[in-house]
Image (tube, rainbow, N blue to C red):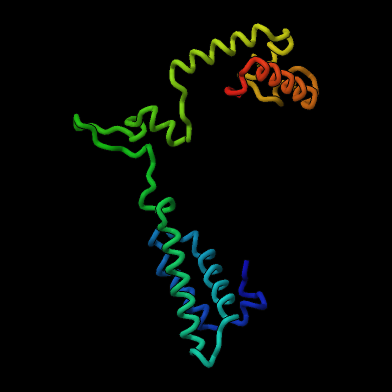
Amino acid sequence: MITPASTETNQLGRFEHGIVRRKVRQLIGSYGFEEQDRESLEQELLLRILQGMRRYDQSQAHRNAFVTTIVERSVATLIRDKCAGKRDHRRIGSIHSLVKCADGGQTEIAETLGQESYDARRGRAPREAETLFELTNDVQNCLTKLPQELRELAELLKQKSVSQIAREMGIPRTTLRERIRQLRERFESEGMRLYL
């Protein structure tokens, strides 16, 4: 983080600090930038000026023109990045926003979404009913073949974390993980690797 007291920032004069403050003031309230972004934006632009000054050649351009170009291009890049498709603040909305219904009433957007939309947003692809039925039968058959200790562990793992189970059973997590490895091997030997 660059602070006005840093050695490098002291190389920058009133012009540089002034143009940065002016540009940031123009950005706040636009393109999704908020007051809380002010300091970060100023720091970002000052850093870009410092980095750009390494390439400055006074025989090619006046220093102020060079700095202005750096700031203008940097601001354009910040706006472009902020408005990129997945970050575009104009496309973000709450699923709890109200929308009008056909009957004239209002409801939350969340109430209009089906299970398919819910799963898509979470990156889940639910299994088909037939596959779920087969899975249930295969797991049940595999569980009946397990020794009592591993069967109980499998039941506990349906609802609790490894840490919770280790605490309740009073055994170290390393010991429990070894039992889970054995459980996994049993499932794999029964052809259940596809479901693991």
Residue plotted at (75% across, 25% down): 177
Would you place residue 174 above or below residue 130 in this image?
Answer: below
Q: Is residue 9 left or right of residue 84?
A: right
Question: How many badges with numbers are in the image?
Answer: 0
Name the spot of residue 104 as percent of width and height, x first: 19, 32
Question: Which quadrant would the N terminus be assigned to in this image?
Answer: bottom right
User: Furthest residue to the bottom?
Assistant: 59
Q: Nearer the viewer, residue 38 or 67?
A: 67
Name the spot of residue 95 as percent of width and height, x first: 38, 38
Residue 72, quarter of the rendered image: bottom left
Would you place residue 110 above or below residue 88 in this image?
Answer: above
Residue plotted at (42% across, 68% down): 76
Would you place residue 52 above or below residue 160 in this image?
Answer: below
Residue 143, quarter of the rendered image: top right
Q: Is residue 78 visible?
A: yes
Q: Is residue 147 left or right of residue 31?
A: right
Name the spot of residue 40 as percent of width and height, x first: 54, 64
Name the spot of residue 80 as percent of width and height, x first: 42, 62
Q: Is residue 7 left or right of residue 104?
A: right
